Amino acid sequence: MTMRVGWGRLTRRSHLLVSLCVLVAAACDPSSQSTPGSKSERLAIVSFDDALDDKSSPTADAETFWKIFSRGQESFRQKDYASAFKDWRSLAVLGSQLKDISTVARGAKAYFVLMSQILVGWCYDHGYGVGQDKSKALSFYKKPAKFGIPFLQYEVAIRYDDGVGVQRDRAEAARWYRRAGEAGVVDAQFLLGNRYSKGDGVEKDVREAVKWYRLAAESGHSHSQAQMAFAYLLAEGVERNCEKARHWAKRAQESAKSAVEKVGARVTLDMIQAAESLCR
């Protein structure tokens, strides 16, 4: 099953950009901070090395992690990007040392490490405080993505899909789309459906394609709803059912937001209605 309407490649929303904007805005808002101590107290640490023992292990308490992370936020707000990058990176590189990063005991430290990894990746991505390096950006994005942060799993998939910072790898992209899709990222579900419908990076399986299209369609994704309409009309991955084809075509039209989506949904509905002879 392939796209029947010439919408072209799906215009993907930048989950990473939106999420980072929220993160940085909240991080730089002093009113959103709940950790005890004044701003000057939170920024008082000279370097992260002060908090490490002779073995250079992350033995500092969670408040120390917070102070360093917070200082990086303040530096970023003051447009001292190099200092912000330095502080965030000092936390980001500790990920491999926090063996129990997902446990409750390590939860607070893990949060600051994971957020720092995201922000360091973003700095490398856009050249804030460090030379732009898409490969290193991907490397840092992948660290928290492996711990189940959906928008980053989707971002990593896109990078493998487009060959940004890494050699293009459609199979690896599909694996990351699956992880993001399983976590509920609707665009990832749609793109994974496309992969299975075409056999792109995965073995072609129209039933599996319909499974992922349906998940996205039920969340209001207009492109996936249109695909469900064609699936029922053409009996691809499901039994032919024109009533359900019309149902999904109408839902696609209702869900369409952009001008391109509205045109595509209208054409889809017209095509479904014109092809009803297939059901007779």
Image (cartoon, rainbow, N blue to C red):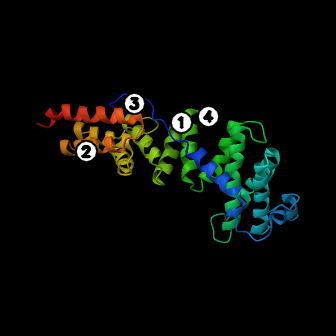
Residue on which disc 4 sits: 164
Quadrant holding the N terminus = top left
The first of marks 1 and 3 along the sequence is 3
Q: Is residue 168 above or below residue 216?
A: above
Residue at image location 51% in from the left, 41% down from the top: 13
Quadrant of the rendering where the C terminus is positioned: top left
Q: Secondary structure at mark 1?
A: helix
**What's the CA distance linking mark 4 and mark 1?**
8 Å
According to the picture, the residue beneath numbered tag 1 turns out to be 161
Nearest the viewer among 204 and 229 is 229
First-in-chain label (2 vs 4):
4
The residue that mark 2 highlights is: 238
Q: Quadrant of residue 94?
A: bottom right
Q: Gap between marks 3 and 4, in whole Å?
A: 24 Å
Which residue is the site of mark 3?
A: 7
Q: Residue furthest front?
A: 31
